[in-house]
Amino acid sequence: MGNITDLIKDVASKNQIIETFAAKVIDINKETESLHNPEDAYTVNVMRADGAIIKNVRLKASILDAEQGIITIPKKDSWVLASIIDGVETRAFVSQFSEVERTFIRFKNEQNQYLEIGTDVNKVKVLFKKQEHNTDSSSKPVSNNIAQIEFNGNIEDPSISTVFFDENGREISKNSFNINEQNININEGKAIFSLKDREAKVTFKDGFESIISETKTSFIKDDLTFEMDDKFKITAGGKHLLTELESLITEVSKIVVVQGVGPNVGKLVTIKSNLNKLLKT
């Protein structure tokens, strides 16, 4: 099966006949085991008005060309115009569409950098990536992502997200926005920063975490927690500072001095009351 580009050149040079007919899309095929990107391996099976079925009708010039091209995927059960060159069914391709399910577009430059755009009724995804040098031509090309933009128009949860990757294709930052929240994640070294629901959060992978919101501020390191809103909360190892101070005051108030003069319990009660204004459990 030659490329449609070459076949059309043959038509121009040899005056071949191109037959076009209306047909219904009955199956959408995808070669998932292709050595190339599976996005490029789509074909469709169609049924003509007379009931004849033609399989593996192409959607692009070369169904196994992972370099560049546009794939328009029709809706199943929709009608298309299919063309056959010189009566040979293996040369069939879809020339016009009545309904489109989604499209996939890929551009490439001489530095093996790619721009891929995928669209359907709910989503537009734009991906920049670069193909790594591959000395083994029999294996699937390996690519590292550079950046990605995605628009999700789902009526229940419309959103926009952007992602950036390092030189190894590892995600280093992601920003997402929808009608209810903004979420920012930055993986810089050992730190992750996020902003969501009017709450800023910084997490270090060595166990330290800081949260700042309109209602409270907290710092956490392993089993130590410091929290502040209308009061302070300090805990360590499951123990609360307020509880421990209250226990200390209670024990001190029980002390009986040998000379018969006890501690000033009234002042201890005042101190305990003041602690409850400052601290909580």
Image (cartoon, helix red, strand yellow):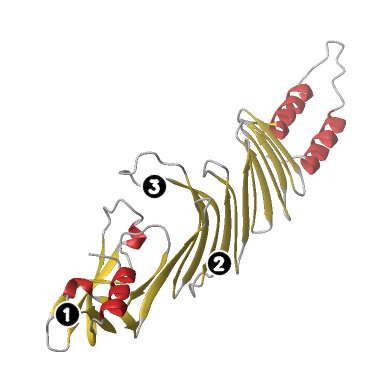
Give x and y (percent) for residue 40: 35, 62
Q: 220 or 2: nearer the eye? A: 2
In the image, taking residue 94 as reference, residue 68 lies left or right, namely right
| Quadrant of the frame with the C terminus | top right
Residue found 26% across the figure and 82% down from its top: 15
Q: Which mark is residue 141?
A: 3
Pointer 1 local density, CA inside 10 Å: few below 14, some 14–19, many at least 20: few
Which residue matches tag 1?
Answer: 87
Give x and y (percent) for residue 167: 56, 42
Dot 2 lies on which element?
Answer: strand
Observer-side mark, 1 or 2, equals 1
Give x and y (percent) for residue 49: 16, 89
In the image, taking residue 105 as reference, residue 76 lies left or right, namely left
Pointer 2 local density, CA inside 10 Å: few below 14, some 14–19, many at least 20: some
Q: CA distance from mark 1 to mark 2?
A: 48 Å
Dot 1 lies on which element?
Answer: loop
Marks 1 & 2, CB-CB < 8 Å contact: no
Dot 3 lies on which element?
Answer: loop
Q: 50 or 20: nearer the eye? A: 20
Q: Pick out the residue farthest to the front.
A: 13
The amino acid beneath tag 3 is Pro
Which residue matches tag 2?
Answer: 159
